[in-house]
Image (spheres, rainbow, N blue to C red):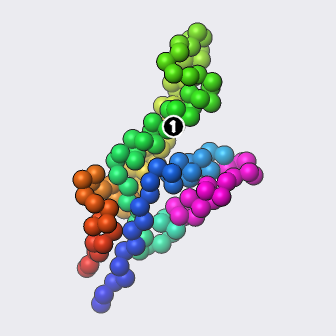
């Protein structure tokens, strides 16, 4: 019996970040079209047993970098300018650490528990990765 080929969806940093923004701002009714589309892509991967996500480790590092930059910008801190208030420094560090840890925990659980995420080699062309099929 032949199984249905596995559908592979490549997730770049834009999809991840749009999805994370929607998760964070789920109470806000003004979510963007991009966030809604990213959410539907992630939900399809989670719910369809023949669909997996592919990403590169550089994309994960880029998301962590974006988290840091967005938090710093949100707290109105630019560049390497020192924060005078020690409490603000601690709050900034804790916020960045919590969001980064949350993202890493999320993708780790997704990869380990369900096998729905594969981190692919940087030096392998995406076209060859998407062409491969799993066979039983």
Pick whichever, 10 or 87, lies toward us.
10
In the image, is residue 128 above or below residue 64?
A: below
Q: Position of residue 114 (x, y in %)?
A: 40, 62
Decide if residue 114 is in sight here.
Answer: no
In percent of the image, x 56 and y 58: which residue is there?
Answer: 38
Magenta span: predominant SS is helix
In the image, is residue 71 above or below residue 106?
A: above
Decide if residue 53 is in sight here.
Answer: yes
Q: Which residue is labeled 1 in the image? A: 67
Q: Position of residue 99 (x, y in %)?
A: 52, 37
The stretch drawn in magenta includes residue 32:
yes
Quarter in which the N terminus is drawn: bottom left
Pick whichever, 82 or 46, lies toward us.
82
Name the quadrant containing residue 115.
bottom left
Q: Position of residue 55 (x, y in %)?
A: 38, 55
Q: State left or right for residue 67 relative to residue 118.
A: right
Report crowding for label 1: few under 14, some 14 to 19, many 20 or more residues within 10 A (C-alpha).
many
Extreme right residue here?
29
In percent of the image, x 57 and y 51: which residue is there?
Answer: 18
The stretch drawn in magenta includes residue 24:
no
- Dot 1 falls on a residue whose secondary structure is helix
Extreme bottom residue here?
1
- Looking at the rendered structure, the number of numbered marks drawn on it comes to 1
In percent of the image, x 32 and y 62: which residue is there?
Answer: 126
Quarter in which the C terminus is drawn: bottom left
Q: Which residues are magenta?
A: 26-43
In percent of the image, x 26 and y 78: which residue is there?
Answer: 135
Q: Position of residue 105 (x, y in %)?
A: 44, 45
């Amino acid at each position: 019996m032949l199984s249905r080929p596995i559908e592979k969806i490549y997730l770049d940093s834009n999809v991840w970040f749009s999805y994370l923004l929607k998760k964070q701002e789920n109470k806000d009714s003004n979510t963007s079209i991009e966030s809604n589309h990213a959410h539907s892509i992630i939900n399809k991967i989670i719910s369809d047993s023949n669909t997996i996500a592919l990403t590169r480790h550089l994309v994960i590092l880029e998301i962590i970098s974006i988290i840091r930059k967005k938090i710093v910008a949100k707290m109105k801190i630019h560049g390497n300018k020192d924060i005078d208030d020690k409490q603000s420094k601690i709050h900034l560090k804790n916020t960045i650490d919590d969001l980064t840890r949350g993202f890493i925990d999320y993708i780790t659980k997704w990869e380990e528990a369900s096998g729905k995420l594969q981190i692919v080699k940087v030096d392998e062309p995406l076209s060859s990765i998407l062409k491969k099929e799993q066979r039983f």
